[in-house]
Image: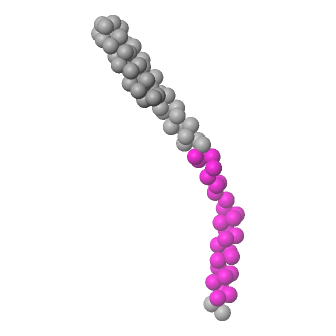
Amino acid sequence: MYLLLSILLSTILGYLLLMMGPLVGGFLAFGIFAGILFRGLYLLNDIHKRLTKDEPKYDPVKEAYENYLKEKESQVQGN
């Protein structure tokens, strides 16, 4: 239903832009297009921030400790 409403409103908007003439219609169409692009970029940036927030941070101490445990385990198995 939302898709049908969007198609109908887009058709009406396109018809109105054609009736306004090339200068006014062009300015309005450019404004709408630029607004959609900026909104899309904003949403992509928001999604990126939400996804990267959950990533674990790099911890050199933890990595060194894990390497130490691996070396110790390999030495124990080697003997």
What is the basis of the colouring in this image?
Answer: one colour
> Vertically, is 23 above or below 39?
above
Majority secondary structure in the magenta region: helix
Where residue 22 sits, quadrant-wise, is top left
> Vertically, is 8 above or below 16?
below
The residues colored magenta run 51-77
Magenta includes 59?
yes
Spot occupied by residue 35 in the image (x, y as percentages of width and height): 46, 23
Spot occupied by residue 15 in the image (x, y as percentages of width and height): 32, 13
> Vertically, is 55 above or below 9?
below
On the question of residue 26 being in view, the answer is: no
Left or right placement of residue 29 versus residue 57 in this view: left
> Vertically, is 64 above or below 20?
below
Q: Residue at x 60, y 43 (%)?
A: 50
Q: Residue at x 49, y 28 (%)?
A: 39
Left or right placement of residue 11 versus residue 1 in this view: left
Of the pair 37 and 69, the residue shown nearer to us: 37
Q: Residue at x 68, y 76 (%)?
A: 69
Q: Residue at x 56, y 37 (%)?
A: 46
Q: Residue furthest front?
A: 1
Where residue 59 sits, quadrant-wise, is bottom right
Q: Residue furthest bottom?
A: 79
Magenta includes 15?
no
Spot occupied by residue 42 in the image (x, y as percentages of width and height): 52, 32
Quarter occupied by the N terminus: top left
Quarter occupied by the C terminus: bottom right
Left or right placement of residue 35 versus residue 48 in this view: left
Where residue 34 sits, quadrant-wise, is top left
